[in-house]
Structures are given as structure tokens and as C-alpha cells.
Amino acid sequence: MSEPADIAAMSFEQALSELEQIVARLESGQAPLEDSIRMYERGAALKAHCEGRLEAARLRVEQIVQRAGGAIAAEPAEFG
């Protein structure tokens, strides 16, 4: 299942911002059920997009480190 074109074109920061807005609206409990389901579906697509962008960035950093030093000395990054 591919993500919608508008999400695919988003930067990580744009997708994360929209995901945070969706989470806030869902947590408020004010949206009707059908709207909540649509928001949840979009939120899931945004989350997957963000995860993909983070993984791509991680791989790029590993390649840079590997080229610069010949060996990867990576430590887990903390996001949040």
C-alpha cells in the first residue's frame, strides 16, 4: 500500500507537524467517529512516511561516516 501523493511530497518536518496535530485532535475526543477514523488512517500514513525518512537519513549518515573513517562507529540516536 503506497502513501498518498501529498504525503510522499512532504518533508519530515511537515509530516511530523501534521501528525502531531492529528494526535492532538484525536486525544481531544471531540471529532465524530468517522472523522476520527479518517484522521487515524492519515496519521498512520504520516507515521510510516516519517519512519521512512528517518531510516533514509540514518543510512546516509552511516555512509558518510563509513567514507570518512573507513569504519562505522555508530551509537543509537535518541529522537524525541
Image: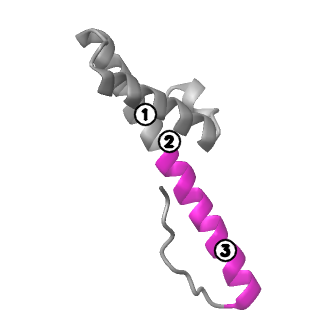
Dot 3: what SS?
Answer: helix
Dot 1: what SS?
Answer: helix
Please give the residue where the numbered disc 2 appears in the rendered image. 49
Q: Which residue reaches farthest right?
A: 68
Residue at image x 59%, y 66%? 59
Using the rendered view, name the quadrant where residue 40 is placed. top left
Residue at image x 37%, y 21%? 39
Measured from the top left, where is residue 54 in percent x and y? Answer: 54, 55
Measured from the top left, where is residue 46 in percent x and y? Answer: 47, 35
- Amino acid type of the residue tagged 3 in the rendering: Gln
Q: How far apart in space, not on screen, are marks 3 and 1 (Cα)? A: 27 Å
Residue 16: say if magenta: no
Q: How far apart in space, not on screen, are marks 2 and 3 (Cα)? A: 21 Å
Against 71, is 17 above or below? above
- Amino acid type of the residue tagged 1 in the rendering: Ala
Residue 38 shown left or right of residue 4 in the figure: left
Measured from the top left, where is residue 25 in percent x and y? Answer: 38, 22
Residue at image x 67%, y 83%? 66
The reply to whether dot 1 and dot 2 touch (C-beta < 8 Å) is yes
**Closest to the observer, 80 or 3:** 80
Please give the residue where the numbered disc 3 appears in the rendered image. 63
Against 57, is 4 above or below? above
